[in-house]
Amino acid sequence: MADRDGFIWYDGKLVPWRDATTHVLTHSLHYGLSVFEGVRAYKTDEGTAIFRLKEHTRRLFNSAHIYQIPMPYDQATIEAAQCEVVRANNLESCYLRPLVFFGAEKLGISPKGAKVHVAIAAWPWGAYLGEEALAQGIRVKVSSFARQHVNVTMPRAKVATTYANSIIANAEALQDGYDEALLLDTEGFVAEGAGENVFIVRDGVLCEPEIASALTGITRSTIHALAADLGIPVRTSRLTRDDIYIADEAFFTGTAAEVTPIREVDNRKIGNGRRGPITERLQKAFFDVVQGRDPKHKDWLTKI
Ligand code: PMP
């Protein structure tokens, strides 16, 4: 990733991609405290547009607030910077990664005295779990690792340290021949995927787990709005792993994963083992919105 052309916004200015480096004694590299976002921009008929830029930027600032990281810029500056990065790299559709981290001025647990840095990169990134996954669905393993308790890493923050848990769960799933991991919380109820929220469909109702030990996904909230548009009822409750096994349909949502059907969990077929009809309607509605074909939700698109 480091050796390519282009520009990264780094502490207030665009720098050549290869020069956006940091020292090995960077505090966040040692103790894992950095907060970040994953954002996508899509090509629309009216040009490239960033999807739900305000909501992602707000979540970045909330993550910093939760972890008491003083943000050196305001939200408007970080929103404008994301648009600038897409333009500077001539990207039609891309993934954006804003990152806030502590620098190399000091080590030791307390970051006090370390400078807060902000970097924003953007690059083309296709379907996270593969194009085929969007149509055919993926195979998921319930992880032997639990999602952190709500008082461990604080799930409203998109904080790097949570992803050690995601990485180990995802690695276990891949090593066992699955495509992605589904994590349960410390009480054994469904939390979320390694990098996605989860939904199931049962008897025509869209069900999701209570968002306790899970990130409050922006794609998830998009799905809520689209389900309302389509007249699909949504229910939020505690879900067990076997609620997923007996679902008619299941899918993951996330900025990277978009709307990815789940065709199998722990070697149990979900529904008929293919993308279900409600999943397909929501997936289509999602792509209509992000690609600017749905006039009702144009306010979610920021033209760059
Ligand atoms: N949960 C986790 C752990 C994630 O990493 C993500 C991706 N950011 C999500 C859920 C989905 O969030 P969003 O739809 O805002 O991308």
Image: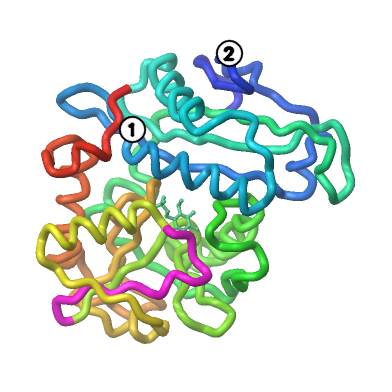
Does the magenta-highlighted stretch encompass residue 207? yes
Residue 157 location (% of width, % of height): 56, 54
Check the image and report above or below for 129 versus 169: above
Residue at 18 percent across and 43 percent down: it is: 297
Frontmost of labels 2 and 1 is: 1
Magenta residues (range): 203-216
Quadrant in the picture for residue 259: bottom left
Amino acid residing under circle 1: Ile
Instruction: Measure the C-alpha gap from mark 2 to mark 1.
Output: 22 Å
Residue at horizontal 26%, vertical 58%?
223
In the rendered image of this protein, does residue 204 appear above or below residue 293? below
> How is this picture coloured?
rainbow
Ligand 1 quadrant in view: bottom left
Q: Residue at x 68, y 30 (%)?
A: 117
Residue 215 vertical placement versus 49 (above, below): below
The image quadrant that residue 190 belongs to is bottom left
- Image quarter (top left, top right, bottom left or bottom right) of the C terminus: top left
Q: N-terminal of the two: label 2 or label 1?
A: 2
> Is disc 2 surrounded by few (<14), some (14 to 19) or many (20+) residues within 10 Å?
some
